[in-house]
Image (cartoon, coloured by chain):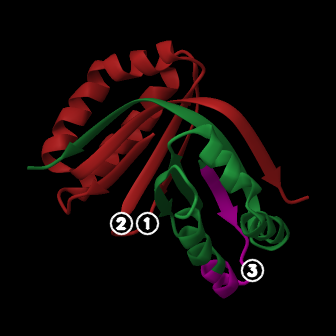
Chain colours: A green, B red
Amino acid sequence: MFTSVRTDEDDDGYRRTAERLSELVKEIPGFLGEDSARTPGGLAISVAYFRDLAGIDAWRRDARHRAAKEYGREHWYERYSIHIARVERSHDHARS
Amino acid sequence: MFTSVRTDEDDDGYRRTAERLSELVKEIPGFLGEDSARTPGGLAISVAYFRDLAGIDAWRRDARHRAAKEYGREHWYERYSIHIARVERSHDHARS
């Protein structure tokens, strides 16, 4: 779970990198999917789902992901929080 | 974690109820905080943090919360997913 507030800096570079990372994470074994939402001018929440902790660790160690995070800390994010969490129960609902 | 896609229905009623629920959840013992983001016309993600499962269960059983969910299933949500997850590691970063 990645919760962040952006700076005003370099929106194009940010978007390109975000799109590239969205493609890269799909290659990680055990990656299940991703949900993202962003309130304009406010908070963004991205949740990446993995089958197990090994997948999360592989993504955390990915060199291209690490480089983007390092650049992002300096340029793109006012603040962010990362929570690693184990899903214990899930429930889906869809209109029929 | 509550991930949802809204219908077009009754935005005022939805907003009033969402604000009321945001106040009510603060009364639940063990409630730690809430993060929300919504992409206009797209996905919304709300994450409520609790100290323990007892707090999550108390909120799940709350009659006013249940009534809002029941109404929401019929009127406000195209679809939603709920994930109950245990936070195992966290990391915060803020610009100095």
Q: Circle 3 is placed at which residue position?
A: A9
Q: Secondary structure at mark 3?
A: loop
Can marks 1 and 3 be said to lie on one chain? no
Q: Specify whether B1 is left or right of A90.
A: right
Q: Is residue B28 magenta?
A: no
Q: In the image, is B61 to the left or to the right of A15?
A: left
**Which residue position holds label 2?**
B42
Q: Are marks 3 and 2 in contact (CB under 8 Å)?
A: no
Quarter of the image that includes the C terminus of chain B = bottom right
A85 or B13, nearer to the observer: A85
Q: Chain of mark 2?
A: B
Q: Chain of mark 1?
A: B
B72 on left or right of A21: left
Marks 1 and 2 close (CB-CB < 8 Å): yes
**Where does the magenta region start and end?**
A2-16
Residue in the foreground of this view, choosing between B5 and B21:
B5
Quick one: label 3, few (<14), some, or many (20+) residues within 10 Å? few
Q: Viewed as shown, does residue B95 lie left or right of A10?
A: right
Q: Secondary structure at mark 2?
A: loop
> Element at badge 1?
loop
Kind of residue at disc 3? Glu
Q: Which residue is mark 1?
A: B39
Please state which amino acid type lies under the numbered disc 2.
Gly
Extreme residue toward the left, this view: A96
